[in-house]
C-alpha cells in the first residue's frame, strides 16, 4: 500500500510489531459500513462514478458475508482490517476498488471505525445494565420487608431491608448508564473526511457520511478528528466505575455466602466445588467478577499512559488503543451477565438476616430518636443516655428490647414502657419513612417505579 517509497518490505520483527489484524479484525462490520457510506458520498459528489460505487458496495457486501460466515481469510501481511478489506475488494471487482480510498486515510478511517465499535459496545452495555437493574428491582420488590443488618465499618449499624440494599445497586447502575450515555453523546461526531490530518481538496459532503453512520455531525477540526481518543478513555472510565460497582456487590455476595454469615445461598449455576474438599461450595462467579475489575481499570490506565505524551496528530502508538479496550468491554459484559444471573439465582435466608439485624444493638439509634421525640432531650444528651443503656444491656447479655424497663429508668427515669414500641427491628425499618429511607413502603414504591421505567418501550 505504500511500496512506491520503499525498495523492500519490512523485516519479520517489524511485521510482527506492526500488525494489528489479530484484534482489529473485530472492526470488520464498522469498517465495511464506513466504506459503503464513503463510496456512496463520493459518487453523489461526482468524485467517482455511480457504477464504481455500485460495484464497491456489492463487493463490500460480499466481503461482509464472507466474514460473517467465517469464509474470509485474514492475512497478517496486510497489517490491518482496512487493507484486508481493500485487498479482497480488489480481488472481487478489480480497478474500482482502488478508488474507494479517494479522499480518506487510514487515520480518519480507524478513528471512524473504532468510534462506531465503541458506540455499539456502549449500546450493548446499556442494555445489559438495564437487565441487571430489572433483576435487582424484582428481587427488591419481593424482599421489600425482609430485614437485614445495615453496616458501617462492616459493623452492625442499623436495620435495613434486603430490598433497600438491592435498590442501592439499582441507583449505582443508573449512574453508570448515565456516564455511558454522556460518553456516547460526546463521541458522536464523525472523523470521516478528515483524511490524514489536514482535510482534503476533494469536495466532500461530510454531513452525508456522518448521517449515514448515525453520527450527529462531522468532527469540526481535522487534526482533532484523527488524533482524538477521548472517546475510548471516557468509555473506559465509565466501564471502570461500573466494574467497581459490580465488584463491591460481588464482594458482598462472597461474604453473604460464607457459612459464617449465611445471608444468601447460590445454586450450582454460579458456584464451584473443590478438588479435595467435598463439602465446599465456592462463589467463584462473584470472585471472578471482582477480579475482572483489575483488567478493566488496567485498560483505562494503560491507555492514559499511551496517550499522555503524544503530540498532534496520529501516532502509531494509538494502535494500542484497541486491544485493551476490547478486552475490557468484553470483561464488563461478562461481569454484568454474571451479576444479573446471581441476583436472579440468590436465595436469601430471611430468618438468618433478621437474627443478625437484631444483634449488635442495631436499634440504639431508634432509642436515641425516641428520647429526642418523646422526652425532648437534645440529641447529644440522648446519644449519651443511649450509650449507657446499651452498655447496661451488653453487661446483662440481653438485646435492647429485652432489657428491663427498670434498668433503663435507672439511667433515665423519664423513660416509659412506650420505648419498647421502637426497639424491634421491624418497627425500626418501618419508621424510616423519610425520602430514600428503608421503610418497606418506600422500597415497594421505589422498586415498582424502577420496574415501570425499565419495562417502558
Image: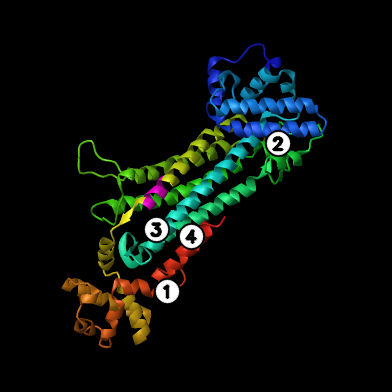
Tell which circle, 1 or 2, labels the residue nearer the N-terminal end.
2
Name the image quarter holding the C terminus.
bottom right
Secondary structure found at label 3:
helix
Picture quadrant of residue 394: bottom left
Number of numbered tags placed on the structure image:
4
In front: 396, or 37? Answer: 37
Residue 311 in view here: no
In front: 117, or 130? Answer: 130
Q: Is residue 153 magenta?
A: no
What residue would you read off at disc 2?
192
**Residue 398 shown left or right of residue 160 in the figure:** left
- Residue 433's tag is 1
Secondary structure found at label 1:
loop
How far apart are labels 4 and 2 at the CA level? 40 Å
Name the image quarter holding the N terminus.
top right
Tell which circle, 3 or 1, labels the residue nearer the N-terminal end.
3
**Crowdedness near tag 1: few (<14), some (14–19) or many (≥20) residues, C-alpha within 10 Å:** some
What residue would you read off at disc 4?
451
**Crowdedness near tag 4: few (<14), some (14–19) or many (≥20) residues, C-alpha within 10 Å:** some
Relative to 318, say whether 236 is above or below: below
Q: Position of residue 12 (x, y in %)?
A: 54, 15
Secondary structure found at label 4:
helix
Foreground disc of the pair 4, 1: 4
Image marks 3 and 1: residues in contact by CB distance under 8 Å: no
Relative to 152, say whether 55 is above or below: above
Residue at the image point whose x is 75% and y is 40% from the top:
208
What residue would you read off at disc 3?
139
Residue 173 in view here: yes
Tell which circle, 4 or 2, labels the residue nearer the N-terminal end.
2
How far apart are labels 4 and 1 at the CA level? 21 Å
Amino acid at each position: 500500500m505504500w511500496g512506491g517509497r520503499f525498495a523492500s518490505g519490512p523485516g519479520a520483527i517489524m511485521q510482527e510489531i506492526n500488525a494489528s489484524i489479530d484484534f482489529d479484525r473485530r472492526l470488520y462490520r464498522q469498517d465495511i459500513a464506513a466504506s459503503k457510506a464513503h463510496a456512496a458520498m463520493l459518487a453523489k459528489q461526482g468524485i467517482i462514478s455511480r457504477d464504481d460505487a455500485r460495484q464497491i458496495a456489492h463487493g463490500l457486501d460480499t466481503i461482509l458475508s464472507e466474514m460473517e460466515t467465517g469464509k474470509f481469510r485474514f492475512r497478517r501481511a496486510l497489517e490491518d482490517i482496512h487493507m484486508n478489506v481493500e485487498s479482497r475488494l480488489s480481488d472481487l471487482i478489480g480497478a474500482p476498488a482502488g478508488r474507494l480510498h479517494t479522499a480518506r486515510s487510514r487515520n480518519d478511517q480507524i478513528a471512524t471505525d473504532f468510534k462506531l465499535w465503541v458506540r455499539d459496545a456502549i449500546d450493548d452495555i446499556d442494555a445489559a445494565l438495564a437487565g441487571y437493574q430489572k433483576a435487582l428491582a424484582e428481587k427488591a420488590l419481593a424482599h421489600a420487608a425482609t430485614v437485614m443488618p445495615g453496616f458501617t465499618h462492616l459493623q452492625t449499624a442499623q436495620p435495613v431491608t434486603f430490598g433497600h440494599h438491592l435498590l442501592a445497586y439499582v441507583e449505582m447502575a443508573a449512574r453508570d448508564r448515565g456516564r455511558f450515555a454522556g460518553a456516547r453523546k460526546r463521541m458522536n461526531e464523525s472523523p470521516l473526511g478528515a483524511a490524514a490530518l489536514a482535510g482534503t481538496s476533494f469536495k466532500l459532503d461530510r454531513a452525508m457520511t456522518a448521517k449515514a453512520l448515525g453520527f450527529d455531525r462531522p468532527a469540526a477540526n481535522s487534526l482533532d478528528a484523527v488524533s482524538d481518543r477521548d472517546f475510548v478513555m471516557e468509555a473506559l472510565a465509565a466501564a471502570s466505575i461500573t466494574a467497581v460497582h459490580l465488584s463491591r456487590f460481588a464482594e458482598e455476595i462472597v461474604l453473604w455466602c460464607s457459612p459464617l454469615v449465611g445471608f444468601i445461598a447460590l445454586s450450582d449455576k454460579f458456584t464451584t466445588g473443590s478438588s479435595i474438599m467435598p463439602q465446599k461450595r465456592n462463589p467463584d462467579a462473584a470472585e471472578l467478577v471482582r477480579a475482572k475489575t483489575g483488567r478493566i481499570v488496567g485498560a483505562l490506565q494503560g491507555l492514559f499512559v499511551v496517550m499522555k505524551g503524544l503530540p498532534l496528530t496520529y501516532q502509531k502508538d494509538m494502535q494500542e488503543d484497541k486491544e485493551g479496550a476490547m478486552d475490557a468491554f468484553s470483561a464488563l459484559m461478562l461481569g454484568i451477565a454474571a451479576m444479573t444471573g446471581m441476583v436472579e439465582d440468590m436465595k436469601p435466608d430471611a430468618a438468618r438476616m433478621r437474627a443478625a439485624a437484631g444483634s449488635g444493638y442495631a436499634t440504639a439509634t431508634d432509642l436515641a430518636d425516641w428520647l429526642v421525640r418523646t422526652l425532648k432531650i437534645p440529641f447529644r444528651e440522648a446519644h449519651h443516655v443511649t450509650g449507657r443503656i446499651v452498655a447496661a444491656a451488653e453487661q446483662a447479655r440481653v438485646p435492647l428490647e429485652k432489657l428491663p424497663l427498670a434498668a433503663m429508668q435507672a439511667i433515665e427515669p423519664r423513660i416509659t414502657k412506650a420505648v419498647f414500641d421502637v426497639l424491634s427491628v421491624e418497627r425500626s425499618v418501618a419508621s424510616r419513612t423519610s425520602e430514600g429511607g428503608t421503610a418497606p413502603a418506600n422500597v415497594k414504591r421505589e422498586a415498582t417505579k424502577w420496574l415501570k421505567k425499565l419495562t417502558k418501550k
